[in-house]
């Protein structure tokens, strides 16, 4: 189904590694597919390729279980250029990224997973975001790439500055803006003091740089367990797995993230449902 010409682009980014970007990308992709959206996906962290492998595993599972409804996105990995000249490699990466996006132009939504480091490809991807989702582990060390505590103030740090730059690129390219969402991930019921401190800092930063902070995802084993089969929490019903209370809570957290994205197409889909 394609109701608008240009897909809505969701980028999952944080230049800190291991914050849950690929896991969250996959859950967003499957949630959107189940809601009836035509979904494309791009992995600009193609060397590590976690999202690409997650999708490959899903394809293998779907083929081995033709009786089950396991929808897949149209997926395109984009690799870092191997050219020696920085200028030429940047030109090639821009061209490869544009080609990938063009190949997904019929999708309603394109979800882009990015690496946990600063890279040219990651910057390019950020500059195309309509929605940017930044998962953040509940740790002061992880918060540091987003904001630095300066006396009683929190000022934007490395990653926040990079996003600011890409917002300007986006505005210059097509006058569009980026809706930036921070979601805390792997929240644990332990370590309450750290949790409260990160929550307070995220709140302060949110006011300062115009980012929305939304309810987080808990630390749950199920997020790690489904990777090899390429499955997500959103597939449990189709698999006829009786969910535990922890599964239900986790699924609710993912649904709440999906609602917070406020896709422009959502209303249209609901009407046609
Ligand atoms: N809410 C969660 N509960 C438990 N484990 C989680 C959760 N979110 C992510 N993980 C696990 O944390 C690890 C890192 O997650 P993931 O690979 O999605 O992060 P990433 O940000 O994509 O990492 P990188 O920066 O290396 O690309 C994985 O083992 C994943 O299964
Ligand atoms: Mg990743």
Image (cartoon, rainbow, N blue to C red):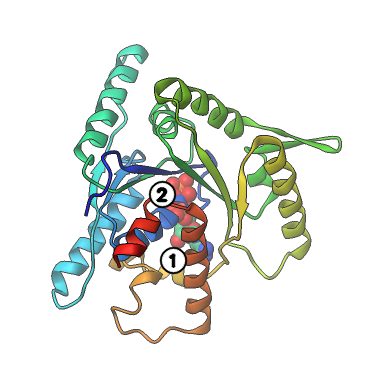
Residue furthest front as drawn: 271
Identify the residue at horizontal 66%, vertical 44% (top origin). 143
- The quarter of the image holding the C terminus is bottom left
Q: Earlier in the sequence, mark 2 or mark 1?
A: 1
Identify the residue at horizontal 70%, vertical 69% (top origin). 190
Q: Is disc 1 surrounded by few (<14), some (14 to 19) or many (20+) residues within 10 Å?
A: few
Q: 131 or 44, which lies in front?
A: 131
Residue at the spot of label 2: 264
**Residue 146 percent coordinates (x, y):** 63, 38
The image shows residue 51, relative to residue 255, as above or below, that is: above
**Residue 223 percent coordinates (x, y):** 45, 67
Residue at the spot of label 1: 224
**Residue 49 percent coordinates (x, y):** 32, 46
Element assignment for label 1: helix
Residue furthest right as drawn: 151
The image shows residue 20, relative to residue 225, as above or below, that is: above
Mark 1 CB near ligand 1 (8 Å cut): yes
**Is residue 100 in sight in this rendering?**
yes
**Residue 247 percent coordinates (x, y):** 47, 77
Label of residue 44 in the image: none
Element assignment for label 2: loop
Left or right of 67? Residue 236 is right
Mark 2–mark 1 distance (CA, rounded to whole Å): 31 Å
- Depth check, mark 2 against mark 1: the one in front is 2
């Amino acid at each position: 189904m394609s109701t608008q010409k240009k897909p809505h682009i969701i980028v999952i980014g944080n230049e800190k590694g291991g914050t849950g970007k690929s896991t969250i990308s996959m859950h967003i992709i499957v949630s959107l597919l189940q809601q009836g959206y035509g979904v494309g996906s791009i992995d600009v962290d193609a060397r590590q390729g976690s999202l690409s492998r997650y999708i490959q595993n899903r394809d293998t599972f779907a083929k081995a279980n033709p009786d089950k409804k396991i929808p897949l996105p149209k997926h395109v990995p984009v690799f870092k250029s191997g050219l020696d000249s920085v200028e030429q490699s940047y030109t090639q990466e821009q061209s490869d990224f544009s080609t990938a996006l063009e190949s997904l132009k019929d999708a309603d939504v394109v979800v882009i997973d990015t690496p946990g480091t600063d890279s040219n490809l990651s910057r390019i991807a950020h500059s195309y975001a309509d929605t940017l989702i930044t998962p953040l582990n509940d740790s002061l060390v992880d918060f540091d790439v987003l904001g630095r505590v300066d006396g009683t103030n929190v000022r934007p740090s490395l990653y926040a500055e990079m996003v600011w730059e890409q917002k300007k690129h986006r505005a210059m390219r097509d006058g569009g803006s980026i809706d930036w969402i921070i979601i805390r991930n792997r929240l644990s019921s332990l370590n309450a003091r750290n949790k409260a401190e990160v929550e307070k800092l995220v709140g302060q930063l949110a006011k300062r740089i115009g980012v929305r902070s939304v309810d987080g995802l808990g630390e749950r084993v199920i997020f790690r367990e489904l990777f090899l089969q390429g499955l997500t929490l959103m597939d449990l019903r189709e698999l006829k797995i009786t969910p535990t209370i922890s599964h239900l809570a986790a699924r609710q957290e993912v649904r709440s993230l999906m609602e917070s994205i406020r896709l422009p197409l959502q209303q249209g889909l609901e009407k046609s449902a």
